[in-house]
Image (cartoon, rainbow, N blue to C red):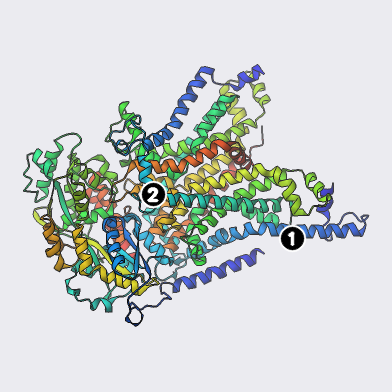
């Protein structure tokens, strides 16, 4: 009786292996065009990150009012997005459309989760006016798997009121490491509850967004252009880590920063308790709604000047597992159109249409000018193991920054991280 | 009796009371924190440093929980999920382990000892180790991201303990009762239901409580197997609350969520502790 | 008596040749139908256990021999995953930390459990009330308890930290989750709070099974309280201790919830446990085959440790 049980179990295991090897291809129709050219209909599900909560519903409402097809939005916590989306896609219970952080595109494209839309994308009238960084990340082996959706760039936010109190000129934000350090020290001196600078010490994704531009602006990089070599032990990284470590050692950062996974950092700035933070365009929406802080925006400087930014944001894609691909593509297409992108710009979100950035977005608020400039010169690392390497809060990148800035031995942290990073790249997705 | 009592009492009376009251205060303090934080007004709940006693009484944090402000999907739905899954798993576990317990105790068949031993062996295999392939099996059956699937998984986790408890309950009962019923003309199953079951009720209640608490509080499997926010159970919902929206964490709402999660367990425990504790001890003393 | 007759009435094993054939046949039919019924009532539970437990265990062993990404192609690699495990610095560190955690928690919980059990030994209603209070945290889940304690020790807003600051033992801006020792300390405190009541209960019932006459006899013979404890109580408590220890050690070796929730494995991955690492490998790194191999290793270690404990501690029937 035990033997037959074992045999049956092995048989089932074998069948699971076979089915699993074959999984990834969908049984539903691969066509993105609705039958006989009529308008797409039906309901589709869309997953987006929690940082898009503010405008996603507005967008969905606008679409639903003017289209036969209806879209249902589900918000997934940023920290769990890769895990949830990956697991659901593998299990066949994923959404029709997904708005994905663009850094994850190479991974999902390479594992067959996203629908190939090369042909349809090439027919778009504005295809040359879409953000180049986004387009590059959506491409895998010369095929297009997603369209750019929302843009994002990292910049330095500073509290003008605190600057004034500390005797600094609010019209002249710091332009290199030393100026940041000095400004931070002066603001810290204002009181025991006021800090000069803060960061998210236990957050990989936050720091690839906020910290890397310092390295870029100083002329270095953290990953080779083809994504095959990690550069975590480069001298520019050493200088940037040392600079942050100096800030920590000078006491301008709160102790809580060490274990902050990204929730305390913006809250502190919102409460007017910190002089400077590096965050993105999404934060302006929060500050503008709050109306409490008189904030300024500046490009992120390098060691001796210059500036750089992380061109981020989301791409939007049709999933291979979608059961209603015509409607899904219809929404994806609409999301990059004039109406949708203008709607985004009106809600303080940076559009991905370079033709609209200046006309609609930058004109809305003088500060937005900085974002559009940042986007033009922004960089994005390209990697199929982005999540394991950079965004993972327990991965080598997050650990390196945490150990170097808050611990002590910068170079040892770098060495360890470099080894682990290269190992991850070698193992592959 | 007096000399016995004095040998059993290593600690003098006053000291005993002082120690116990101090310890009780320490043990109860976290509960005080949850309750007081939840009923503070949202503004006061965010105060740094925190206030020692709530200044005003407010349902504000709970209101935030139950409107869709936090986490996106309704907290009420997630509460409902927990109720559904826990009660479902409890009922299923009671039925299956009572049947199996009776079978193992009274209706011996070829290989029953071996199977019973196999059931016990599952105590030695942690479900954390099994979660990866379990996920694949559920996927094949189409039960991932499905509350029924989760219910079945929880039932399975709790069956070994339940079967063990019920088997012991039935085995401990004298066979004369059963024989008497049989002689009176009842079929075997009817004999069981009408005669033995009422006597084994304590075991059933203990199994029910054990399963309910285990299912209500389970975090790991629920985190992995449920991908839709609308299908999360309470512990995972707390996880969502703790990551905040737009990066700001509402501690008051989180503690209100913790309160909602622990109050049912405390109420049930206080009302039925005799059975819960009794069951645990019977189960533990092999 | 009737019970015995039923039990011996198996085909071919009748030990009573003087019993008339008709009742014997009836007894055989009765026992066959009973055993069929037995198989029937046991099978629903067994089916569930097979599908959701035994089958996954077998599958796990098979998966561990493959490179099995969640999304992508599967390939057979024999013992490759196991070899990789011993080279995996993160895994080795997680295993080491799990052992450290177990070594800290086990004696801590046992001592506190025994202390509480001795405290509530005094007969009377007050003892029952205190017993209920100490046991109360047991019914709170690890997730809820984790978020509760995370808040209590949070810098600036945590009430526990606030009380300690007022008492001069800490300062409001202290980040206890920022250093390894203090982060581990908070988690251990939480687990003690949550689990000590259970240990108290089990140990207490073990204590109650020790005949008081033995204790009294020893006291009359002039033994001090500590001697009574060492030479009478402890040895007789051994079976209970064995049980408590096996579950305590298993629980510590399998720890996940509290670290995922309270420290997120930090600071700098120093509090990642074995199960936490398996979770990351399988469900964040999507390497199911490797995760299965690590799970198999965990299972083996757990079985070995439990077996050793039982062997050492169960032999206790000498007075």
Tell me which chain the residue with mark 2 is part of.
B
Tell me which chain the residue with mark 1 is part of.
C
**Secondary structure type for disc 2:** helix
Residue A235 visible (yes or no): no
- Up-down relation of residue A250 to residue A91 (above or below): above
Front one among A251 and B277? B277
Report crowding for label 1: few under 14, some 14 to 19, many 20 or more residues within 10 A (C-alpha). Answer: some
Front one among B213 and C198? B213
In this picture, residue B105 sits left or right of residue B92:
right
- Up-down relation of residue C207 to residue C307 (above or below): above
Q: Are marks 2 and 1 on the same chain?
A: no
Report crowding for label 2: few under 14, some 14 to 19, many 20 or more residues within 10 A (C-alpha). Answer: many
Residue at 41% from the left image edge and 74% from the top image edge: A26
Q: Which residue is mark 2?
A: B239
Residue A58 visible (yes or no): yes
Q: Residue furthest front?
A: A65
Residue C108: percent from the left, percent from the top? 47, 35
Residue A388: percent from the left, percent from the top? 32, 59
Image quadrant of residue C45?
A: bottom right
Q: Residue furthest bottom?
A: A36
The label nearer to you, 2 versus 1, is 2
Q: Which residue is mark 1?
A: C36
């Amino acid at each position: 009786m035990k033997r037959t049980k074992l045999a049956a179990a092995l048989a089932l295991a074998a069948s699971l292996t076979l089915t699993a090897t074959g999984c990834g291809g969908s049984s539903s129709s691969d066509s993105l065009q609705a039958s006989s050219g009529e308008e797409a209909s039906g309901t589709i599900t869309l997953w987006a990150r929690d940082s898009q909560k503010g405008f996603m519903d507005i967008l969905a409402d606008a679409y639903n009012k003017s289209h036969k097809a209806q879209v249902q939005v589900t918000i997934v916590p940023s920290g769990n997005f890769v895990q949830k989306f990956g697991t659901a896609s593998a299990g066949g219970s994923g959404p029709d459309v997904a708005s994905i952080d663009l850094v994850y595109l190479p991974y999902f494209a390479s594992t067959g989760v996203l629908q190939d839309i090369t042909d349809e994308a090439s027919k778009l009238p504005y295809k040359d006016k879409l953000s180049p960084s986004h387009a590059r990340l959506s491409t895998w082996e010369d095929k297009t798997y997603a369209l750019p959706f929302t843009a994002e760039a990292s910049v330095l936010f500073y509290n003008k009121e605190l600057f004034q109190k500390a005797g600094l000129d609010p019209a002249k934000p710091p332009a290199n490491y030393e100026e940041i350090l000095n400004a931070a020290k002066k603001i810290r001196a204002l009181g025991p509850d006021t800090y000069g600078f803060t960061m998210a010490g236990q957050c990989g994704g936050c720091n690839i967004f906020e910290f890397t531009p310092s390295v870029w602006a100083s002329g270095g990089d953290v990953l080779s252009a083809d994504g095959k070599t990690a550069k975590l032990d480069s001298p520019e990284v050493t200088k940037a880590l040392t600079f942050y470590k100096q800030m920590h050692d000078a006491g301008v950062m709160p102790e809580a920063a060490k274990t902050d996974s990204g929730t305390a950092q913006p809250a502190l700035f919102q409460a007017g308790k910190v002089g400077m933070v590096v965050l993105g365009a999404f934060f302006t929406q929060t500050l503008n709604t709050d109306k409490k802080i008189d904030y300024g925006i500046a490009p992120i400087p390098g060691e001796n000047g210059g500036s750089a930014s992380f061109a981020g944001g989301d791409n939007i894609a049709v999933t291979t597992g979608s059961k209603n691909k015509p409607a899904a593509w219809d929404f994806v297409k609409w999301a990059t159109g004039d109406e949708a992108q203008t709607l985004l710009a009106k809600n303080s979100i940076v559009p991905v249409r370079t033709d609209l950035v200046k006309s609609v977005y930058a004109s809305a608020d003088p500060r937005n000018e900085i974002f559009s400039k940042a986007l033009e010169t922004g960089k994005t690392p390209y990697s199929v193991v982005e999540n394991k390497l950079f965004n993972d809060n327990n991965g080598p990148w997050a650990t390196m920054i945490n150990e170097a800035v808050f611990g002590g031995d910068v170079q040892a942290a770098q060495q360890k991280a470099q080894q682990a990073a290269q190992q991850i790249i070698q193992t592959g997705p | 009796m007096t000399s016995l009592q004095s040998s059993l009492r290593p600690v003098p009376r006053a000291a005993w009371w002082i120690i116990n009251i101090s310890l009780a205060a320490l043990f109860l303090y976290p509960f005080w924190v949850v309750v007081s934080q939840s009923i503070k007004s949202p503004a006061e709940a965010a105060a740094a440093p925190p206030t020692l006693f709530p200044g005003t009484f407010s349902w504000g944090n709970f209101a935030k929980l139950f409107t869709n402000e936090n986490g996106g999907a309704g907290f009420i739905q997630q509460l409902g999920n927990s109720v559904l899954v826990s009660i479902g798993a409890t009922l299923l576990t009671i039925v299956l382990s009572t049947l199996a317990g009776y079978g193992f105790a009274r209706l011996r068949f070829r290989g029953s000892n071996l199977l019973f031993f196999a059931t016990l062996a599952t105590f030695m295999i942690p479900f954390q180790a099994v979660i990866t392939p379990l996920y694949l099996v559920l996927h094949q059956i189409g039960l991932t991201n499905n509350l029924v699937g989760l219910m079945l998984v929880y039932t399975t986790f709790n069956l070994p303990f339940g079967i063990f408890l019920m088997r012991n309950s039935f085995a401990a009962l004298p066979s004369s009762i059963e024989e008497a019923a049989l002689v009176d003309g009842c079929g075997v199953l009817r004999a069981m239901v009408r005669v033995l079951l009422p006597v084994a009720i304590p075991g059933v209640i203990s199994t029910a409580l054990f399963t309910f608490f285990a299912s209500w509080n389970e975090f790991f499997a629920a985190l992995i197997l449920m991908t839709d926010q609308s299908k999360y159970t309470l512990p995972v919902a707390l996880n969502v609350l703790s990551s905040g929206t737009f990066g700001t964490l509402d501690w008051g709402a989180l503690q209100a969520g913790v309160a909602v999660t622990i109050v049912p367990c405390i109420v049930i425990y206080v009302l039925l502790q005799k059975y819960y504790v009794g069951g645990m001890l019977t189960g533990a003393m092999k | 008596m009737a019970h015995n007759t039923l039990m011996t009435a198996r085909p071919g094993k009748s030990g009573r040749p003087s019993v008339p054939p008709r009742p014997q046949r009836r007894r055989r039919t009765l026992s066959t139908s009973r055993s069929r019924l037995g198989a029937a009532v046991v099978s629903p539970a067994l089916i569930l256990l097979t599908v959701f437990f035994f089958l996954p265990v077998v599958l796990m062993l098979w998966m561990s021999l493959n490179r099995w990404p969640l999304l992508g192609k599967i390939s057979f690699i024999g013992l490759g995953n196991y070899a990789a495990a011993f080279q995996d610095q993160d895994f080795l560190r997680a295993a080491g930390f799990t052992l450290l955690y177990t070594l800290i928690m086990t004696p801590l919980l046992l001592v506190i459990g025994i202390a509480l059990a001795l405290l509530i030994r005094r007969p009377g209603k007050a003892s029952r009330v205190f017993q209920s209070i100490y046991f109360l945290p047991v019914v709170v889940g690890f997730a809820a308890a984790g978020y509760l304690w995370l808040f209590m020790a949070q810098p600036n807003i945590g009430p526990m930290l606030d009380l300690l600051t007022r008492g001069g033992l800490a300062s409001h801006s202290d980040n206890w989750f920022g250093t390894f020792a203090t982060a581990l300390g908070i988690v251990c405190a939480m687990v003690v709070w949550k689990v000590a009541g259970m240990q108290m209960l089990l140990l207490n019932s073990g204590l109650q099974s020790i005949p008081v006459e033995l204790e009294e006899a020893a006291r009359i013979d002039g033994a001090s309280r500590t001697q009574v404890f060492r030479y009478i109580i402890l040895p007789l408590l051994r079976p209970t201790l064995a049980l408590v220890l096996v579950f305590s050690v298993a629980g510590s070796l399998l720890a996940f919830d509290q670290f995922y929730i309270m420290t997120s494995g930090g600071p700098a991955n120093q509090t990642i446990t074995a199960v936490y690492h398996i979770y990351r490998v399988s469900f964040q790194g999507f390497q199911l085959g490797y995760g299965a191999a690590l799970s198999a290793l965990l299972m083996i270690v757990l079985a070995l440790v439990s077996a050793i404990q039982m062997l050492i501690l169960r032999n206790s029937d000498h007075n």
